[in-house]
């Protein structure tokens, strides 16, 4: 739904060359025009820059009878090629001004056409042949134009009949073929396809006198011949980016532009707006991007003075309909009539033409969507489409009509070239149309159009500009007028001052704002600064939003009040990936979509697809902005209807501003005034803040969601709504009140069922009240019937249970016997039975405890089955036999759970001393065991036996030697065994105390001294082993680190082959090497993925193998070194005690050697700490990237194994240097 808007029209009419222009070519490098006349070649821009005579060298006759059949600029050769009708092909070098005849054809030339890549040139001769030459004018082949054969693309018959037997229309199969028109110059026309692989030739057949089109390939081999088309005219042009060839055909009742496929068959047409004998088409011209077809026409009927009118029409297509967008009238003056017309080869919408009077005209058009500019609800969102002498108006507020249809048509007396809408508020539905004959027609609502000629427009004031204005835009909010000049400069027009003036446009910092390239579409908005985005395909400014579509097939809706240049850059650079899923400003659209308009005060955005059809979308940013406005102004009903229609989550009503919503609950209910709508809102509630998940505020937005009340959101909203509804009219809102109970985090089904039961018992008399049956039926719609039945059973109300069961699909045989059985039971046992049936075991136990002692066995079994020991103990008195039985059962359970000490405490307090003693002995709780033994009481001999058993079989096995010595000394009265236990546990000082306490100095020689020497020897050997292992691991760690650093440097310094595929080779090789390196461990990882956590931890530890060459060998060595340091550092107290014992018994040599060995080991490890745990080792390795990285190094860094939770680098051990262990008396 776009129109062509004239941006700039340049006319150069002050020059006069020799003769009359015949054809011209546009120089792509300079933009000048090379015009060939019957005397010379002239370069125009806009003055004569260069002129070369063709008569001086006798290429053309001096009497002016010569004809130039073709001219072509050759930028690669810095030359221009000219072909004359006499047969000469002339090459003029523009840099050296040399004129050279590169070839001549005796029979003369009728046409010259270069391929789009300018590698080949085709010449048609006077003998009706085609000569194909290279760009160096070396002949390739010469073939005749008129071929009897169809070509290589000849159709294959499948036996379904012949051409002669087919229907030939009303004229019959023997109808005479119509010859070419009388005004046809009978010259061949040559046109190339855009890719240069095919070209078509239109020529007059010698036998029939009618024109035929033949298609040839690049090797000048005939491909196809068109079917006989009566009335086919001379014009011919191949669509650059397609397979259609445009030509014209005169029918008995109309004049059409027809299209042919490359196989010669017709494929579509459109009718020219003239009578069948009114005009002749001189040429058809496609622009470079195939979007516009120019038709050059001339009247066939001369006026009184023998003069004819000339026209140029620009046609576009959309949805298979051809629109006449521009009509240029050149009048009857022969000097103003075009001599030749051509599109610019580089600028698709620039048209060049040269008149017979040597005037050069250049037209620049741009695409524009002519839409109304209103911002209130009275604007109909009008879009006007020009179609010849009609304006097609679509009012998108009322309906979306796919083009070429429209809401209504405006029929004008002449073709329309421009249309615009009124910008004054309240009048934005009025439009004005500029016709090709120079009149302006203004259309308003409810009145006839006003016709205003252009000559009555009298300027009030005039301001000189330093360039050509190609666009103008006006802001109705600020009254600012912006002008864009042809070079991209932006100027501000101060029209409301005393003396109108034009000044440069500057931003807040004083920087001048200019576009690097002229923009076709401009609009005024405030962003901070202006920037040209290269990937924007269309945009529109609406209210406070800038909506734009990009070439990456997205539609952005950005808020201008908070938009910055950086924000605009980030938004346009984003690709809409996974991270942009909840970005309200972004929406994916179909490839090639363009914005048509936005419906004011609505959320509808109209897009047009490349093929022409329309789509209406509701952009999330527009929708959310309107919803936030409605919620801020407490228009809950309007917001609710919009959210229902557009499927916006209703949680936003509360999440937008919880505090305001809770204060306005009554307003919300009164505005909705619909039970169904309230229920819908309640059922959609969920524990999620949609303003942070689904509909987050834009990062630069000022408004944010206010914090709500503490607690769970669903419960807060349900309670607030229920309280308000109950205070307003509990009968009217009965169903919504039930919904609020059911929707809570913990559904209050019992309360809801009770309310239904009350309705049944006491039916309300209000007119708007709901019956119990309706309420129950609705409740069963919300909740599963089986779940509802069970909850009703849990209320112990059999009337309610029967009411639910009757409304369900249950068979009475399923529930009646069970209900009848329950009615026969005692109340507490009845409730116990119901709770047990519903698996509410705690409640069942509570009711069963009230049923008396006869049911205690059943209660005990329930406790054991469901492990409700703690709950059961609280239901019985502590002095009751039931309490004791429960305690014993609980103790048995604790023993099974390896918690014998707690079992012993339970048994001890309930009087089961013997069983408690067994539990304490089993848990090695010797103090509690001795207390219970004294309480029983046990005889002295049994007490000593108990003590000896506890010490020998429990404590010594647990390495609790000091506690075992206490039992043996104080309760078993065996000092020798106590001293032996202390010596075994290396508790030297306590053992020495007991030796002297019980006067057993003989044990010193027999046990203590040998144990001291043995401990010294063992510690010395252990230290030597740990020291050797530490040195070995430290040395290996240095080697591993050196190898890894060497490999990394080799990757960084690797020489890459000098070829374009080097990156591919390096990446492929790194991927292969990485996969080979990690294959050994990848399989084991996949096997253990589904195993238990214990096995996973075991597998993780296996990865830290000390085997040489494993990927994580350095991590394993660090863990091993840390363990060695911890184990050695932990020996300080033990070594200190051992040294004192050795020194006491004059083993100074052994003590000195042990102290020296331990000190050296500690010093070695402390010195090695900075070397082993280097600075920065704790940081996780990051991928190697940067300007000096190669593909190999980056891939290798990504493929390096990442440490998991069990493979993290261990922190450096902290040595306890504050613990004093040395003896200063030893040297």
Image (spheres, rainbow, N blue to C red):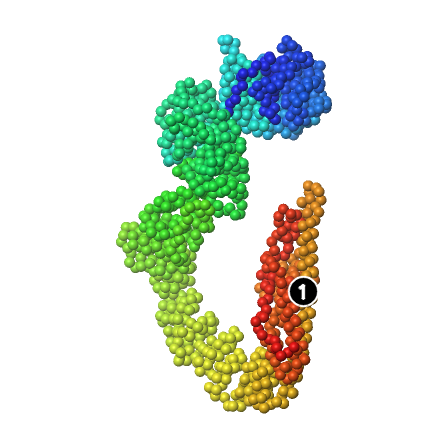
Height in image: 30 above or below 909?
A: above
Considering depth in this image, is 293 or 1004 the residue closer to the camera?
Answer: 1004
Please provide percent x and percent y for residue 686. Answer: 42, 53
Please provide percent x and percent y for residue 66. Answer: 64, 12
Could you tell me which quadrant the C terminus lies in? bottom right
Tell me which residue sits at (45%, 29%) in the image. 503
Considering depth in this image, is 800 or 199 the residue closer to the camera?
Answer: 199
Tell me which residue sits at (62%, 13%) in the image. 38
Please provide percent x and percent y for residue 879. Answer: 39, 80
Height in image: 761 above or below 851?
A: above
Tell me which residue sits at (45%, 73%) in the image. 869
Neighbour class for label 1 at 10 Å: few (<14), some, many (≥20)?
many
Q: In this view, does 324 lie to the left or right of 78?
A: left
Please provide percent x and percent y for residue 230. Answer: 58, 18
Height in image: 987 above or below 445?
A: below
Considering depth in this image, is 783 or 1185 the residue closer to the camera?
Answer: 1185
Element marked by disc 1 = helix
Considering depth in this image, is 623 or 868 the residue closer to the camera?
Answer: 623
Q: Quadrant of residue 477?
A: top left
Q: In which quarter of the image is residue 947?
A: bottom right
Q: Do we see residue 59 in this rendering?
A: yes
**What residue would you read off at disc 1?**
1034
Residue placed farthest to the left in the image? 765
Tell me which residue sits at (53%, 31%) in the image. 517
């Amino acid at each position: 739904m776009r129109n062509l808007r004239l941006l700039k029209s340049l006319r150069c009419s002050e020059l006069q060359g020799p003769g009359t222009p015949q054809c011209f070519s546009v120089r792509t490098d300079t933009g000048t025009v090379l015009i060939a006349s019957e005397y010379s070649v002239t370069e125009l821009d806009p003055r004569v820059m260069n002129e070369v005579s063709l008569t001086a060298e006798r290429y053309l006759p001096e009497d002016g009878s010569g004809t130039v059949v073709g001219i072509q600029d050759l930028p690669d050769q810095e030359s221009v090629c000219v072909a004359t009708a006499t047969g000469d092909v002339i090459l003029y070098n523009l840099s050296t001004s040399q004129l050279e005849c590169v070839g001549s054809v005796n029979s003369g030339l009728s046409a010259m056409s270069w391929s789009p890549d300018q590698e080949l040139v085709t010449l048609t001769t006077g003998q009706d042949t085609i000569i194909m030459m290279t760009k160096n004018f070396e002949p390739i082949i010469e073939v005749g134009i008129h071929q009897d054969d169809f070509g290589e693309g000849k159709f294959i018959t499948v036996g379904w009949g012949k051409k002669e037997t087919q229907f030939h229309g009303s004229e019959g199969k023997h109808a005479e073929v119509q010859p070419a028109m009388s005004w046809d110059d009978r010259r061949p026309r040559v046109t190339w396809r855009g890719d240069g692989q095919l070209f078509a030739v239109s020529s007059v057949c010698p036998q029939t006198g009618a024109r035929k089109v033949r298609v040839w390939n690049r090797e000048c081999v005939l491909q196809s011949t068109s079917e006989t088309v009566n009335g086919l005219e001379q014009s011919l042009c191949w669509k650059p980016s397609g397979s259609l060839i445009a030509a014209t055909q005169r029918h008995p009742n109309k004049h059409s532009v027809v299209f042919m496929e490359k196989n010669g068959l017709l494929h579509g047409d459109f009718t020219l707006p003239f009578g069948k004998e009114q005009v002749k088409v001189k040429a058809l011209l496609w622009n470079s991007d195939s979007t516009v077809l120019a038709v050059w026409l001339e009247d066939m009927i001369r006026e009184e003075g023998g003069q004819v009118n000339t026209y140029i029409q620009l046609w576009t297509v959309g949805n298979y309909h051809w629109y006449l967008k521009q009509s240029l009238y050149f009048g009857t003056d022969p000097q103003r009539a075009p001599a030749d017309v051509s599109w610019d080869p580089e600028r698709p919408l620039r048209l060049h033409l040269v008149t017979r009077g040597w005037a050069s005209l250049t037209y620049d058009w741009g695409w524009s969507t002519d839409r109304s500019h209103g911002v209130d609800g009275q604007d109909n969102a009008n879009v006007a489409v020009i179609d010849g002498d009609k304006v097609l108006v679509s009012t998108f507020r009322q309906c979306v009509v796919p083009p070429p249809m429209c809401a209504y048509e405006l029929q004008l007396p002449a073709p329309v070239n421009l249309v615009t809408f009124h910008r004054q508020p309240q009048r934005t539905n009025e439009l004005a149309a500029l016709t090709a004959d120079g009149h302006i027609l203004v259309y308003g609502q409810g009145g006839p159009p006003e016709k205003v000629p252009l000559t009555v427009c009298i300027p009030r004031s005039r301001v000189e500009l330093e360039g050509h204005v190609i666009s103008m835009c006006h802001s109705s909010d600020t009254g600012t007028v912006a002008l864009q000049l042809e070079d991209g400069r932006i100027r501000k027009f101060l029209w409301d001052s005393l003396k109108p003036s034009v000044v440069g446009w500057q931003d807040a910092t004083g920087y001048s704002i200019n576009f690097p390239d002229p923009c076709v579409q401009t609009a005024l908005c405030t962003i901070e600064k202006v920037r040209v985005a290269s990937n924007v395909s269309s945009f529109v400014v609406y209210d406070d939003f800038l909506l734009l579509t990009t070439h990456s097939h997205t539609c952005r809706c950005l808020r201008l009040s908070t938009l910055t240049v950086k924000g605009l850059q980030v938004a346009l650079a984003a690709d809409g990936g996974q991270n942009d899923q909840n970005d309200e400003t972004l929406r994916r659209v179909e490839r090639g979509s363009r914005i048509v308009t936005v419906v004011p005060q609505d959320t509808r955005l109209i897009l047009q697809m490349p093929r022409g059809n329309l789509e209406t979308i509701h952009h999330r940013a527009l929708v959310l902005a309107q919803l936030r406005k409605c919620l801020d102004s407490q228009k809950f009903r309007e917001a609710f209807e919009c959210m229902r229609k557009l499927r916006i989550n209703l949680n936003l009503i509360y999440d937008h501003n919880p505090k305001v919503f809770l204060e306005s609950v009554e307003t919300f209910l009164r505005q909705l005034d619909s039970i169904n709508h309230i229920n819908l809102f309640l059922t959609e509630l969920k524990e999620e803040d949609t303003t942070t998940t689904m509909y987050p505020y834009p990062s630069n937005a000022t408004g944010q969601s206010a914090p709500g009340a503490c607690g769970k959101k669903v419960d807060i909203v349900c309670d607030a709504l229920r309280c308000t509804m109950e205070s307003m009219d509990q009968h009217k809102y009965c169903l919504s009140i039930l919904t609020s109970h059911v929707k809570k985090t913990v559904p209050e089904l019992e309360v809801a069922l009770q309310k239904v039961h009350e309705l049944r018992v006491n039916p309300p008399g209000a007119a708007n009240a709901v019956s119990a049956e309706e309420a129950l039926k609705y409740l069963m719609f919300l909740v599963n019937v089986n779940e509802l039945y069970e909850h009703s059973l849990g209320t112990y109300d059999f009337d309610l249970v029967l009411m639910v069961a009757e409304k369900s699909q249950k068979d009475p045989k399923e529930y009646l016997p069970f209900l009848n059985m329950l009615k026969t039971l005692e109340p507490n046992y009845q409730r116990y039975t119901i709770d047990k049936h519903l698996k509410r075991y705690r409640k069942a136990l509570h009711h069963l405890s009230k049923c008396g002692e006869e049911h205690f066995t059943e209660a005990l079994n329930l406790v054991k089955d469901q492990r409700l020991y703690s709950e059961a103990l609280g239901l019985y008195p502590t002095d009751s036999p039931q309490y004791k039985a429960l305690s014993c059962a609980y103790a048995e359970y604790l023993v099974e759970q390896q918690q014998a000490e707690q079992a012993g405490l339970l048994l001890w307090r309930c009087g089961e001393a013997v069983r408690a003693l067994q539990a304490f002995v089993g848990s090695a709780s010797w103090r509690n065991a001795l207390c219970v033994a004294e309480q029983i009481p046990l005889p002295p001999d049994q007490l000593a036996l108990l003590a000896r058993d506890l010490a020998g079989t429990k404590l010594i096995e647990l390495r609790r030697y000091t506690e075992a010595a206490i039992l043996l000394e104080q309760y078993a009265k065996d000092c020798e065994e106590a001293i032996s236990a202390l010596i075994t546990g290396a508790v030297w000082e306590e053992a020495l105390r007991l030796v002297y306490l019980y006067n057993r100095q003989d044990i010193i020689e027999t046990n203590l001294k040998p144990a001291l020497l043995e401990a010294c020897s063992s510690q010395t050997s252990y230290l030597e082993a740990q020291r050797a292992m530490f040195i070995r691991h430290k040395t290996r760690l240095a080697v591993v680190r050196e190898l890894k650093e060497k490999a990394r440097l080799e990757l960084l310094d690797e020489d890459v082959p000098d070829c374009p595929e080097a990156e591919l080779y390096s990446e492929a090789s790194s991927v292969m090497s990485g996969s080979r390196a990690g294959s050994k461990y990848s399989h084991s990882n996949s096997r253990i993925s589904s195993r238990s956590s214990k096995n996973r931890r075991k597998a993780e530890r296996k990865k830290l193998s000390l085997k040489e060459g494993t990927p994580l060998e350095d991590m394993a060595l660090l863990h091993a070194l840390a363990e060695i340091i911890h184990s050695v550092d932990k020996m300080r107290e033990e070594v200190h005690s051992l040294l004192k014992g050795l020194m006491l018994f004059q083993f100074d040599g052994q003590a000195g050697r042990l102290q020296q060995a331990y000190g050296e080991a500690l010093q070695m490890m402390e010195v090695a700490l900075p070397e082993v745990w280097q600075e920065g080792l704790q940081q996780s390795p990051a991928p190697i990237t940067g300007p000096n990285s190669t593909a190999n190094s980056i891939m290798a860094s990504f493929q390096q194994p990442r440490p998991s939770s069990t493979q993290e680098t261990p922190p450096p051990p902290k040595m306890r240097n504050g613990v004093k262990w040395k003896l200063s008396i030893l040297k």
